[in-house]
């Protein structure tokens, strides 16, 4: 099809993995002999034709009939159905001749009979693009046929239809897949491909992404209109961006046939969103008052609701798609738009609506207006949200005549956009700063942006420069810049650079805990541990009494340095509540990261995973890749306990992908530790020891100074099990010194365990008892179970197998209690070696054998118990044969069995009436 709504697919389809999986599943069903029908629906430009073409090109098990409109045609004539049957594209073996009755005139059941006959001969895929554009008779015949195709006839039908088009109603009720806009990651990936080799400026990419609203065709059109200098940032971008006019026309055509008064109300609704947060819609009461002032009955909005252009609810009126709102605005004349904005400004009366009123006046302005700009600046103050203040300052800058004042206001708007969690918007605004009357503020925002999403070494230098420039006149921002520089140095793992930044901070009176924090961290890092801990405890107690999110974050960090992980979790939870209630939004991912890390240290892995996932979504949504890398590392650590090795490796790789180019030493250390811990769980101690040795040793490749000691117990365990125990002695000595300086409740037990691993004879036995005694004084099922596992292993190696079974059983129960599925296989192996049936031990926990498996393992086990081969299981569950082999080995190990026959017997006993897959 070549009509105005078609998107020509780029080299690959971005952001459509879910949709492609659904199409692949449908084609797999068709190959297996099952018919299926699916309607792809979407607003213009989202790629429904590209997906249809992908399905047609990917089908190789039979012929394809593909029908599309001819170039320049808007409506297929009656012969369009004949084109499908007689001259549509056909791949694979040829299709039987079409009966003469279809050439002479369309019988109601003729298409159904023909497709049924063809399906009886072999699999057939029918693809119809823009079926809503067919003439009514052909469209009705197609709908009649696809609704009545027998499922045992191997005919797959894929249709595309535009949303809210009259012709689409013929296919209502059929299975449908609605395409949505691309998410930010997919839009960026598409833009990277579209601009490949042209070195686009980051701010330009973000502006195009924002304007493109996730629409592939619009993104493509916007990029094509940019000159090289505009794309690389050498020339300012046009305002507004040009491109996509044909697409906007397609959206506008959806409301063009509505009554004139309805279109005016739609224009009012579109204009009213200018002073609202993105996606909030228009205030229904405001719209009603504006309509009445214009002499329009508010009920005239009904036709727009009936057509699906807008929807009302909760006191708001929202457009069905953001591009439809934009099309309504752009299709109106300039004079009409200004009149509507002025009307809204008139209705927005009262002091509580000052900023929205000024924004509407700014939209109605025909040129520069310094007085209005000054009014916007005065209104952009707390308690207005940062996003609103950024928007107001942006409009004030556009209305200002003085270039220096314009730049200052753009820089201020950029800072508020960053605080609102919109780094892309902040970069765009910074790109509009031409004169720099306050260079420190621009450097400050650039440094903060790099701290959250860039090389942290660059962030540190930018923030130090900003602090020097801001110091004479802005002490509060100077302190914040230096704290940011210290955070950058911490992320880098550069302790001297951290101390340098902290030593420059001169706290002001508003935050007394800040001075204690700076002095305490400095004392700890230079070795004055007692003094540092006293200062940090005072800081924690002082900051914990506040409701400020930033102070509570510092309280949590202080508690972690002290080793008081429970206090750190409490401070993190309070910081989360504070940032959700009062902002700023930019802190939300970081607060969730710190809370998840504290919970991980406290042994609450499931809760840590929950908060880390939420934080990861928030970080990706707000473009904070550095925070996302740390959250991936936390998720990798959680997966090294509760998940599977593949999950751990996936998160660790995601963390490393950002940590390496951005210099995030802490995230890299945590990710490597997570992978090594998963290797230990799998019994691969040699690989774990090799991975951990550079992290815990002294040298250029050592891990982060604040986290390397946490990995020492894993290194000692791996080294001893791998026969490299002599290399771990120095690490235990260093860990003993660290233990004496921390309040971490797990450290004494871990130290005793490390010493037990390196000891022999009676000394080793005493050390094991010491470790278990320490565990009795501290919470944490996971660490206790690890000690019991290693103790049982030691007893077995001492040929005390009967004694070994008790701690091993306790370890199995402990791992099951804390959800450490990855570790239970290792315990079961030890139990087998100690002469105990693992299935019997598992039944002693009160769990059915089937519940000892992960959900994926349960599905595979059931299939195998039914007699399926590994290849058949792979086809049934859409997995690779290799993945099935891997999971099946783990099933056998987990259940302590060696054959499929044993598996069948075991599952039939535990689950005589299995649920369907």
Image: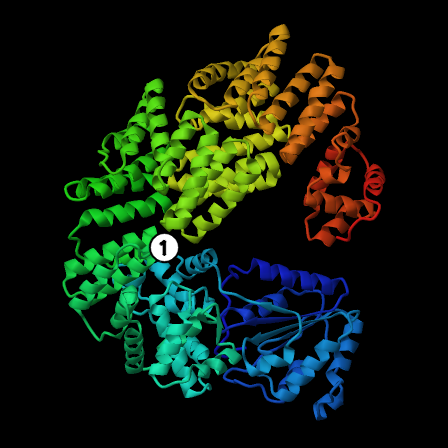
Foreground residue among 501 and 96? 501
Instruction: Give the x, y percent position of residue 507.
Output: 23, 34
Q: Is residue 523 above or below residue 275?
A: above
Q: Is residue 476 left or right of residue 252?
A: left
Q: Secondary structure at mark 1?
A: loop
Instruction: Give the x, y percent position of residue 908.
Output: 84, 42
Q: Is residue 308 above or below residue 691?
A: below
Instruction: Give the x, y percent position of residue 896.
Output: 77, 31
Q: How many marks?
A: 1
Measuring 73% from the left and 40% from the top, which residue is drawn there? 851
Q: Is residue 903 left or right of residue 139?
A: right
Instruction: Give the x, y percent position of residue 411.
Output: 24, 54
Q: Quadrant of the N terminus?
A: bottom right
Measuring 71% from the left and 43% from the top, which residue is drawn there? 857
Mark 1 packing: few (<14 Cα in 10 Å), some, or many (20+)? Answer: many
Residue 694 shows in the view: no
Q: Is residue 4 above or below residue 798?
A: below
Residue most toward the front? 350
**Display colour scheme:** rainbow
- Disc 1 designates what residue? 422
Foreground residue among 480 and 311? 311
Measuring 47% from the left and 46% from the top, which residue is drawn there? 615
Residue 307 shows in the view: yes
Which quarter of the picture shows residue 813?
A: top right
Q: Is residue 824 left or right of residue 734?
A: right
Q: Is residue 66 left or right of residue 361?
A: right
Residue most toward the top? 762
Which quarter of the picture shows residue 17?
A: bottom right
Residue most toward the bottom? 104
């Amino acid at each position: 099809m070549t009509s105005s709504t078609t998107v020509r697919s780029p080299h690959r389809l971005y952001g459509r993995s879910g949709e492609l999986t659904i199409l692949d599943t449908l084609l797999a069903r068709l190959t297996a002999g099952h018919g299926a029908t699916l309607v792809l629906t979407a607003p213009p430009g989202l790629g429904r034709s590209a997906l249809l073409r992908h399905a047609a090109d990917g089908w190789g098990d039979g012929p394809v009939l593909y029908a599309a409109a001819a170039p320049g045609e808007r409506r297929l004539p009656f012969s369009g159905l004949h084109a499908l049957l007689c001259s549509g594209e056909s791949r694979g073996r040829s299709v039987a001749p079409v009966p003469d009755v279809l050439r002479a005139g369309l019988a109601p059941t003729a298409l159904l009979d023909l497709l049924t006959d063809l399906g009886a001969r072999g699999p057939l895929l029918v693809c119809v693009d823009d079926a809503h554009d067919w003439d009514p008779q052909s469209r009705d015949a197609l709908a009649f046929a696809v609704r009545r195709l027998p499922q045992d006839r191997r005919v797959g039908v894929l249709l595309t239809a535009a949303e809210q088009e009259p012709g689409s109603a013929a296919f209502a009720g059929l299975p449908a897949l609605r395409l949505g806009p691309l998410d930010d990651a997919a839009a960026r990936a598409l833009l990277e491909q579209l601009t490949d080799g042209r070195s686009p400026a980051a701010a330009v990419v973000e502006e195009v992404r924002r304007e493109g609203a996730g629409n592939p065709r619009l993104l493509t059109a916007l990029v094509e209109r940019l000159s090289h200098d505009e794309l690389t940032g050498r020339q300012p971008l046009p305002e507004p961006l040009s491109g996509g006019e044909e697409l906007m026309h397609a959206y506008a055509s959806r409301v063009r046939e509505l009554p004139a008064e309805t279109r005016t109300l739609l224009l009012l609704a579109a204009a009213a969103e200018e002073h609202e947060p993105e996606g909030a819609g228009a205030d229904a009461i405001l719209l009603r008052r504006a309509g009445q002032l214009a002499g329009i009955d508010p009920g005239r909005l009904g036709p727009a609701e009936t057509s699906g252009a807008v929807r009302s609810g909760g006191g708001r009126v929202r457009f069905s798609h953001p591009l439809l709102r934009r099309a309504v605005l752009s299709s109106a004349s300039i004079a009409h738009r200004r009149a509507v904005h002025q009307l809204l400004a008139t209705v927005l009366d009262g002091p509580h609506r000052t900023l929205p009123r000024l924004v509407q006046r700014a939209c109605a302005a025909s040129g520069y207006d310094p007085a209005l700009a000054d009014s916007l600046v005065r209104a952009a103050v707390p308690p207005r949200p940062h996003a609103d203040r950024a928007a107001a300052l942006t409009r004030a800058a556009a209305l200002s005549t003085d270039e220096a004042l314009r730049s200052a206001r753009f820089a201020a708007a950029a800072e508020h956009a960053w605080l609102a969690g919109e780094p892309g918007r902040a970069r765009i605004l910074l790109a509009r700063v031409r004169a720099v009357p306050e260079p420190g503020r621009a450097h400050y925002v650039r440094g903060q942006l790099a701290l959250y999403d860039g090389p942290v070494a660059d962030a540190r230098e930018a923030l130090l420069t900003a602090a020097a420039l801001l110091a004479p006149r802005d002490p509060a921002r100077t302190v914040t810049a230096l704290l940011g520089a210290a955070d950058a140095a911490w992320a880098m793992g550069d302790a001297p650079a951290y101390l340098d930044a902290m030593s420059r901070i001169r706290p002001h009176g508003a935050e007394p805990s800040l001075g204690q924090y700076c002095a305490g961290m400095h004392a700890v890092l230079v070795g004055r541990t007692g003094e540092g801990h006293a200062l940090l405890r005072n800081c924690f107690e002082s900051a914990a009494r506040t409701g400020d999110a930033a102070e509570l974050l510092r309280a949590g960090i202080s508690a972690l340095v002290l080793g008081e992980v429970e206090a750190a979790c409490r401070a993190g939870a309070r910081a989360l509540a504070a940032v959700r209630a009062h902002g700023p939004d930019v802190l939300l991912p970081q607060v969730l990261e710190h809370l998840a890390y504290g919970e991980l240290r406290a042994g609450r892995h499931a809760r840590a995973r929950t908060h880390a996932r939420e934080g990861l979504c928030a970080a990706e949504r707000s473009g904070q890749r550095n925070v996302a890398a740390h959250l991936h590392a936390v998720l990798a650590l959680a997966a090294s306990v509760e998940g599977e090795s593949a999950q751990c490796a996936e998160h660790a790789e995601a963390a490393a992908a950002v940590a390496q180019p951005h210099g995030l030493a802490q995230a890299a250390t945590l990710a490597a530790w997570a992978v090594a811990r998963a290797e230990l769980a799998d019994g691969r101690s040699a690989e774990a020891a090799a991975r951990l040795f550079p992290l815990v040793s002294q040298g250029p490749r050592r891990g982060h100074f604040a986290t390397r000691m946490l990995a020492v117990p894993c290194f000692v365990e791996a080294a001893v099990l791998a026969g490299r125990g002599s290399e771990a002695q120095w690490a235990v000595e260093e860990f003993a010194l660290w233990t004496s300086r921390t309040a971490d409740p797990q450290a004494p037990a871990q130290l005793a365990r490390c010493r037990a691993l390196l000891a022999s004879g009676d000394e080793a036995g005493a050390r094991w008892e010491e470790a278990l005694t320490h565990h009795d004084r501290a919470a944490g099922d996971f660490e206790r179970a690890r000690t019991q596992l290693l103790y049982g292993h030691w007893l077995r190696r001492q040929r005390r197998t009967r004694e070994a079974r008790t701690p091993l059983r306790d370890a199995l129960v402990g791992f099951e209690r804390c959800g450490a599925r990855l570790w239970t296989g290792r315990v079961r192996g030890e139990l087998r070696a100690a002469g105990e049936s693992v299935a019997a031990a598992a039944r002693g926990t009160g769990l059915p054998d089937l519940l000892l498996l992960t959900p994926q393992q349960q599905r595979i086990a059931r299939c195998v118990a039914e007699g399926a081969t590994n290849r058949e299981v792979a086809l049934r569950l859409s997995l690779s044969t290799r993945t099935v082999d891997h999971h099946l080995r783990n099933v056998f190990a987990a259940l302590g069995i060696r054959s499929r026959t044993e598996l069948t017997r075991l599952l039939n006993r535990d689950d005589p009436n299995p649920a369907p897959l």
